[in-house]
Image (cartoon, helix red, strand yellow):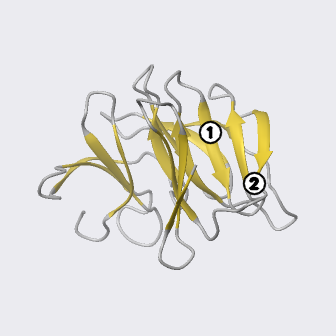
Amino acid sequence: GGANRAPHCIDFSPSGVLYGLSLGGIGVPASGQLFTINPTTGASTLVANLSQFLNVEGDIAFDPTTGVLYAVDGMGPLYTVNTSTGVVTLVGNLPADLPGGADYSGLGFDNSGQLYVWSQFGQALRRVNKANATILSTVFLTSSPGGSVGDVAFDPGTNKCLLGANPSGGLLSS
């Protein structure tokens, strides 16, 4: 990562480039940074400082149909990130799951470009309108993957949804 922080979230673009975003907060820059990452060596290259604070406790994901990079803040804001300039644009805000807020910790697109987000507070997988962040549908998981979900990913061959969680030791659920 950069001099003061490493990428916190990673995803491959449709063209096969691995990107990472660092967590915004204390440090320089406070907004966070966008990197490309060599998947063989792990070496990262700074692309740009982000244009605004982005708490990527949540996740990032590329839309496979448009190549647009999306990021979700753990508290609910959904953004797009320009992969050339680091300009961050608010798409909309996802709802709070509990009176105390939300904890969106996984973001992924299926093969058709449909956006999904995992909320660990509500133990819910949500189908989201990527144009305005409205919720299209919600599935409450009766058998929770447990702990924080680190990612939501779709198998490109089968389009099956996979959730990676980290209760103690790690779980992969579908």
- Residue 141 image label: 2
| Residue behind mark 1 | 116
Instruction: Give the residue at x 47% y 77%.
Output: 169
- How far across and down, in percent of the image, does residue 24 sit? 46, 62
Mark 2: amino acid:
Leu
Instruction: Give the residue at x 44% y 37%.
Output: 155
Q: Splitting the image into 4 quarters, where does residue 96 fall?
A: bottom right
Q: Nearer the viewer, residue 107 or 46?
A: 107
- Badge 2 marks a residue whose secondary structure is loop
**Is 44 left, or right, of 154 in this rendering?**
left
**Is 97 left, or right, of 86 in this rendering?**
right
- How far across and down, in percent of the image, does residue 121 sit? 74, 63
Q: Nearer the viewer, residue 104 or 154?
A: 154
Mark 1: amino acid:
Tyr
Q: Is residue 122 above or below residue 157?
A: below
- How far across and down, in percent of the image, does residue 143 sit? 73, 61
